[in-house]
Amino acid sequence: MDITLLLLGFILMLIGILGSFLPVLPGPPVSWVGLLLLYLTKAVPDDWWVLGITLVIALAVFALDYIIPAVGTKKFGGSRAGMIGTTVGLLVALFFPILGIFGIVVWPFVGALVGELINKADNATALKAAFGSFIGFLTGTFLKFVVTVVYMGLFISTAWDYKGALFPFFD
């Protein structure tokens, strides 16, 4: 059972890291569930402080992910259409990786610009708002990515510390 929880937890860690880029997956909460599964194994002793602190961080980052892009967009004079355009641009980058990894940076900006132009903003206002929406998106994505990678490091470190109990046949 411990091996199953460990594998499911690791898979959730990977999904959480992907979720830091994909808008449909809540990356940090998914990674936190992976940590929870690790601590639910019989091999790893319960540490409710670690789980509580990491849960608060995951939920705070999850909430900030909605606040940061909105603040960035509003600060630069953008609209909801710019934020929607940013998300559409990200989906284009993920499903049609024409520009490779560079596309994850270019397409959200293009999407925000198109969203603002559709919203009837003039070119200068649309460009400024698209930049704000894009900066908000990048900030939120970076924050989610850092948290999920730290959770992955914590997961691997804890699993490594208890490898003898998790994998007794390798001792």
Image: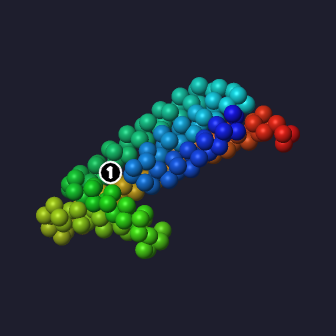
Q: Is residue 16 visible?
A: yes
The location of residue 93, given as percent across then percent down, is 40, 66
**What residue lies at 43% left-to-right and 41% top-to-bottom?**
61
The location of residue 106, given as percent across then percent down, is 38, 69
Q: Residue under circle 1?
A: 69
Tell me the quarter of the image containing the C terminus: top right
The image shows a total of numbered marks equal to 1
Tell me the quarter of the image containing the N terminus: top right
Q: Is residue 32 left or right of residue 160?
A: left
Q: Quadrant of residue 34?
A: top right
**What residue lies at 66% left-to-right and 39% top-to-bottom?**
4
Few, some or many C-alpha atoms within 10 Å of disc 1 (few <14, some 14-19, many ≥20)?
Answer: many
Q: Is residue 166 left or right of residue 93?
A: right
Q: Is residue 128 visible?
A: no
Q: Quadrant of residue 115?
A: bottom left
Q: Amino acid at mark 1?
A: Pro
Where disc 1 sits, the SS reads helix
Visual colour scheme = rainbow
The location of residue 75, given as percent across then percent down, is 25, 52
**What residue lies at 28% left-to-right and 60% top-to-bottom?**
85
**Vertical placement of 34 versus 140: above or below?**
above
Q: Is residue 111 left or right of residue 38?
A: left
**Vertical placement of 66 versus 126: above or below?**
above
Please identify the residue farthest to the right as the structure is shown. 171
Q: Quadrant of residue 161?
A: top right
Which of the pair 162/123 is nearer the observer? Answer: 162
**What residue lies at 43% left-to-right and 44% top-to-bottom?**
26
